[in-house]
Image (cartoon, rainbow, N blue to C red):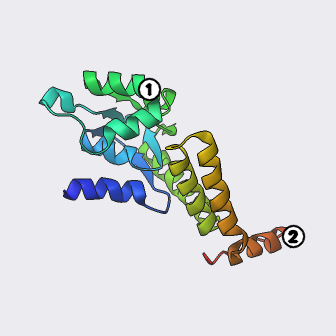
C-alpha cells in the first residue's frame, strides 16, 4: 500500500516532477521515473520492467505509464520480455526526454529545466499539466473542452494580469500564484 500511495502521489502531483536517472532504473525504480512528468537520463542509464522474470508483473503503474509513453506494442514487448534498454533507446522510443553525456550534465540540465518552469506562472503550469494529463484520457473534443475550462480559470487571476503588464512593460513578471 505504501508503494501504491507513492506512485499515485507522483502521478497526481500538481507541480512538475523531473526524473534524473543515472545508472539502472529497473522495476519500481523505472515505474517511479515513469510516474514523473519528464525523464532526463545520463548516457549510462539503463531501464527495465523486469518483473516477468520473477513471476510477477509491474505493479507500480508501469503497464499504464509505459504504454502511454512508448505505445502499446513497445510496452508489451518490453514488459513481456523483461528486456533492459539504454537511455538512447528510451529516447528513440519517446520514453526519455533527453540524454546527457555525464551525470553532471544530467543534474545541471534537470535543475535548469526546473528553474525555467519555476520562472513561469505557477497556476498556468499546474493547469497545463492537468489539461495534458486528463485530456489524454479522453477523446479530442472532450480534452479540448477540459483545456478551455482550465484556460478560462486563468483569465481572471492576478498572475495573468501581472504577466500581461510585465510583457507590455518589457520586464520580468512577479507571479504570486493568485
- Against 5, residue 35 (above or below) is above
Q: x%, y% of residue 146?
A: 60, 54
Q: Nearer the viewer, residue 96 or 106?
A: 96
Given this view, does label 2 or label 1 mark the residue nearer the observer?
2
Can I make out residue 43 in this image? no
Q: x%, y% of residue 134?
A: 51, 50
The residue drawn where x is 76% and y is 75% is 161
The residue drawn where x is 34% and y is 33% is 46
Q: Secondary structure at mark 1?
A: helix
- Left or right: 57 as drawn, with respect to 100: left
The residue drawn where x is 51% and y is 49% is 133
Cα distance, mark 2 to mark 1? 44 Å
Q: Earlier in the sequence, mark 2 or mark 1?
A: 1
- Left or right: 82 as drawn, with respect to 162: left
Q: Residue lying at the far left in this picture: please name it.
A: 55
The residue drawn where x is 60% and y is 75% is 177
Q: Secondary structure at mark 2?
A: helix
Give the residue at mark 1: 89
The C terminus sits in image quarter: bottom right
Q: Residue lying at the far right in this picture: please name it.
A: 168
Q: Residues within 10 Å of mark 2 (few under 14, many from 20)?
A: few
- Left or right: 174 as drawn, with respect to 108: right
Q: x%, y% of residue 173?
A: 73, 72
- Against 128, residue 33 (above or below) is above
Give the residue at mark 2: 168
Q: x%, y% of residue 5?
A: 27, 58
The N terminus sits in image quarter: bottom left
Q: Nearer the viewer, residue 147 or 44?
A: 147
Can I make out residue 18 in this image? yes
* Residue 18, numbered circle: none
Occupied quadrant, residue 82: top left
- Left or right: 52 as drawn, with respect to 159: left
Amino acid at each position: 500500500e505504501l508503494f501504491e500511495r507513492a506512485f499515485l502521489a507522483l502521478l497526481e502531483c500538481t507541480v512538475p516532477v523531473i526524473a534524473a536517472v543515472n545508472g539502472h532504473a529497473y522495476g519500481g525504480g523505472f515505474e517511479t521515473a515513469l510516474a514523473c512528468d519528464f525523464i532526463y537520463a545520463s548516457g549510462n542509464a539503463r531501464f527495465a520492467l523486469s518483473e516477468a522474470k520473477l513471476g510477477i508483473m509491474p505493479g507500480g503503474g508501469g503497464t499504464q505509464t509505459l504504454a502511454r509513453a512508448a505505445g502499446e506494442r513497445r510496452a508489451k514487448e518490453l514488459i513481456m520480455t523483461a528486456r533492459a534498454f539504454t537511455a538512447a533507446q528510451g529516447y528513440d522510443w519517446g520514453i526519455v526526454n533527453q540524454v546527457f553525456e555525464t551525470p553532471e550534465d544530467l543534474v545541471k540540465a534537470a535543475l535548469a529545466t526546473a528553474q525555467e518552469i519555476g520562472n513561469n506562472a505557477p497556476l498556468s503550469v499546474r493547469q497545463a499539466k492537468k489539461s495534458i494529463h486528463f485530456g489524454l484520457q479522453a477523446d479530442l473534443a472532450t480534452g479540448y473542452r477540459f483545456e478551455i475550462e482550465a484556460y478560462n480559470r486563468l483569465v481572471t487571476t492576478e498572475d495573468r494580469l501581472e504577466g500581461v503588464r510585465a510583457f507590455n512593460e518589457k520586464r520580468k513578471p512577479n507571479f504570486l500564484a493568485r
